[in-house]
Image: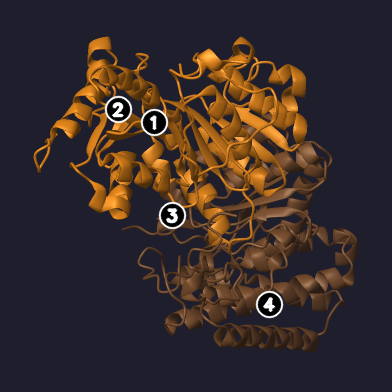
Chain colours: A brown, B orange
Amino acid sequence: MTRVVRQPPAQPLARTRARLEGTTLVELTGLSRDRLLGMYQRMALIRQFEEQAAALYRAGRIRGVTHTYQGQEAVAVGATWCLTEEDYITSTHRGHAHVLAKGADEKRCMAELMGRATGYCRGRGGSMHIADLSRGILGANGIVGGGMGIAVGSALASDLLKNGRVTVCFFGDGALNQGILHEVSNLAAIWRLPCVFLCENNFYGMSGPVDNMLALGPDGFKGRAQAFGLPAVECDGMDVIDVFLGVREGVERARAGEGPTYVFTHTYRFLGHHVGDPLTYRDKEEPELWRRLDPIPNFGRLLVEQGLASTQDLADWDQEASVRIAEAVRYAESSPEPSRDTLLEGLFG
Amino acid sequence: MRGEQIEERSLTYAQALNEALREEMQRDARVILLGEDIGVWGGGGVFGVTKGLLEEFGAERVRDTPISEAGFTGAGLGAALAGLRPVVEFMYVDFSMLAMDQICNQAAKIRWMLGGDVSVPLVIRAQQGAGRGNGPQHSQSLEAWYAHTPGLKVVMPSTPYDAKGLLKTAIRDDNPVVFLEHKLLYGTRGPVPKEDYTIPFGQAAIVRQGRHVTCVALSYQVHKALEAADVLAEEGIELEIIDPRTLVPYDRETVARSIMKTGRLLVTHQAPERAGFAAEVVMCALEDAFDYFDAPPLRVCGKNVPIPYSLTLEAAAIPQTEDLVRAAKRLVEGVPLGGRRS
């Protein structure tokens, strides 16, 4: 078997650094210092959540499968930083980060992973089904491409109800080959719906590498959007600012009634498809190359360079994140299992 | 068709459905329609069910969709989660297979899977059934598939009266409802009150009373059963015809009570016999009224083949009035244990 080693961009945050010549991060993004620091803090929280989820899974304390997100944090955070609490997202089987970035409570997320009554789904959904409609989180999804129809539907509702809400539809490179994406891209385009199709290309659909699985024309990923006459943006998915700026273009277009946008981000999952993945399909060297692009410490360094934080601040926030996640694990572990009597509750309402 | 003689106002089944849609859209601005060729085609869809609605409510609420069953079903679901009450239409239930993930993995599960507090006010209307020469991919009856999926309500009206009342109930329901209309029923007429009324789910209708054989009939087969009952009456055999009207929830009590009176059960639907809803009807009845059975129950259902195109073959594939008459007689005259083989 031949394995292509995917070379990451040569320099971390290269696109953001290029844009920063002669300006500051605050000016470039229009974000307050607190919001910028919040990006780091949320990415750190997500990383800790995923590290703990993986550890708990290996220890046999989480059932089923757990798909973790280490390495991709810039995408979830960069994208959701463009949204209000009322805006919608739909997520994927690798969805912990999306929901945490959109504001879901880490305690209830962890409780769901551990199948407890206090979890977001009362222990019924597990890792792949966390949702919080009060925060516009329309759900992770166990089916590749499964959230895309819902995303276009929430955008349709926003359009008819004229409530100004935008929907961001997260999906991976694997879902680029699901038929429903073709259907909903067309629907969203003909009806000019306020949504952003956000592709996270992490180069593998389970073991299937994009090189072998994805037919692309001369315009690459963007060609998929061009087929529907939709604008497309391509971003460095290891760069939270680049993702933020790219998704913001789409969100602004949606809010202005100009219809959907595709955003393609290129990112990398440091671990495999799920915890326990044998990783027979990729070169051992590859994740090491990409870890140099780790979106969290690299963004931290940028914040320090910009005079927005000190290295001590970064260390404190990392520590804070691990304390919060440890607390979430304690909360989950001390929460009760759902009672057997509740099994049939709420099938209909 | 039943009830014609007492009409105060008679509508076709298609008109009754149309009236339900119109009244619910007038009543609640959140009700929208999504489907293929429901607007401009022929002034309201292939069977006229959405006639006049585009003109009255506009293209925002009466949306002609591209031929994208999965896409527009998913859109209906998402819109339901985000504050609308969509009614999605499949021109033929056969096309719903293209949206199976949206219906069975997504819509059916989402309320329960997310803990039970999420409302999913989505109606999935589909036209189904055989008898019109539409061939193997336009003539199926898929109620058993949907009834088998936890989280979906399944409705099968057989009269204009029920069509209107049940569709209104479906639209006001906060759960996904699969609403299955039979293609041969659209032109049938019956009394439909002008006033607003709903029919609760889970209440069977005793369409005709009788003492000898309980006949549970779904959708179009209710009318076949009525024909059979007339023939049997001449020979002194009385059919008690029960139309469950909704399969989920299913009114097992009405059926059990009837068997306690008749001691005999005949179940009929157009869908293939194997693993069809008739098996569920029979099993529920055995659980509820085993001691009252005087004969083994019988099914008169579709053959276990695709629905053929040819007039002769199609008629052979779906249960006819004579089949019901023959089966009822066997029940009354005694059926040897082991019954028939198919």
Cβ–Cβ below 8 Å for labels 1 and 4? no
Residue B132 position in % (x across, y down): 37, 14
Residue A174 position in % (x across, y down): 48, 51
Q: Is residue B293 left or right of residue A99?
A: left
Cβ–Cβ below 8 Å for labels 1 and 2? yes
Residue A22, relative to residue B32: is it above or below? below
Q: Circle 2 sits on which residue?
A: B238
Q: Is residue A297 left or right of residue B304?
A: right
The residue closer to the viewer here, A83 or A18, is A83
The residue closer to the viewer here, A136 or A98, is A136
What is the distance, in whole Å, between disc 1 and disc 3 at their CAs? 66 Å
Residue A21, relative to residue B271: is it above or below? below
Cβ–Cβ below 8 Å for labels 3 and 2? no
Residue at the spot 35% in from the left edge and 41% down from the top edge = B258
Q: Is residue A29 left or right of residue A275?
A: right
Amino acid bearing label 2 = Glu
Mark on residue B209?
A: 1
Indicate the chain on which mark 2 is placed.
Answer: B
Which comes sooner in the sequence, label 4 or label 3?
A: 4
